[in-house]
Amino acid sequence: MRILVVDDEKLLVKGLKFNLENDGYEVDGAYDGREALMLFEKNKYDLVLLDLMLPEISGLEVCRAIREKSNVPVIMVTAKTEGIDKLIGFEYGADDYVTKPYDILELKARIRVILKRVMTTSQAQKKAEQAEIFESETLKINFKNRSVVANGREVDLTAKEFDLLSIFIKNPAQVFSRDKLLELGWGKDYPGDNRTVDVHIRKIREKIEEDDANPKIILTKWGVGYYFKG
């Protein structure tokens, strides 16, 4: 984890850098708002500890500039105690607020809490993104934009074909009867014949199988229905 500490008090920055590095963080220091933004443009940070009162560019303006391009957590630091400053800091995008003089142990605890929250959120987002994409040796499906690449070439599925394929991919090894697929794909009140399922499966196989006469992706369980091998 990399932290940017921004404060015009050089001894304070030096002390924070020493304490945070002892906890295993990488720490960069900046002594005015302009230097802070330059460092932020050059490097990737996991958290910014930002003093409100800075030369060159104020801490509020630095916070606003950071927030325009990044969701990195910002802890605002100030010597002021008025509640209005805290409200302004939050309006500019700060995630937390500490007042000088602060207890270093409390500050480090707040940093840990925020970074843990960010990591948990990031992992959840990554999991959601992974759930939107399926990939095997022969097939890649993006469920978000409904695109399909089979055997190295993009294939064009109809909306219903994609819906049926998605049912199989998201339920590997589960055998679906024609009636169940008709219900899932067309709705319970669909008046059509379940043979329409066979037609759609055949068309899907023609598009995604290397040899649709010998399918490897969507298989038939004779007398029962269809399933995705997984």
Image (cartoon, grey):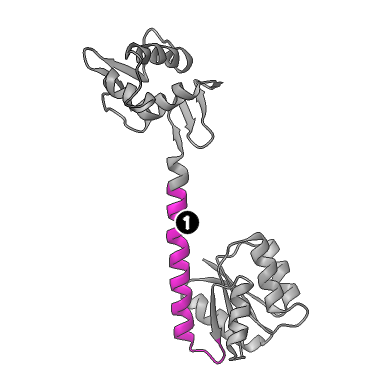
Label 1 sits on residue? 122
Q: Residue at x 47, y 51 (%)?
A: 125
- Relative horizontal placement of residue 24, taking residue 183 as reference (left or right): right
Towards the viewer: 111 or 203: 203
- Relative horizontal placement of residue 4, taking residue 35 as reference (left or right): left
- The answer to whether any part of residue 49 appears in the image is no
Towards the viewer: 83 or 186: 186
Q: Which element type, helix, strand or loop, lies under badge 1?
A: helix
Q: Quadrant of residue 33?
A: bottom right
Disc 1 residue type (three-letter): Ser
Asked if 137 appears above or below 224 in the picture, the reply is below
Towards the viewer: 148 or 49: 148
Specify the segment rendered in magenta.
99-127
Towards the viewer: 24 or 157: 157
Q: Is residue 102 magenta?
A: yes
Q: Residue at x 48, y 29 (%)?
A: 140
Q: Is residue 193 magenta?
A: no
- The answer to whether any part of residue 217 appears in the image is yes
The tally of labels here is 1
Q: Residue at x 48, y 30 (%)?
A: 141
Q: Quadrant of residue 214?
A: top left
Kindly give the residue lying farthest to the right in the view shown.
56
Classed neighbour count for the residue bearing mark 1: other residues with Cα under 10 Å, few (<14), some (14–19), many (≥20): few
Q: Residue at x 47, y 70 (%)?
A: 114
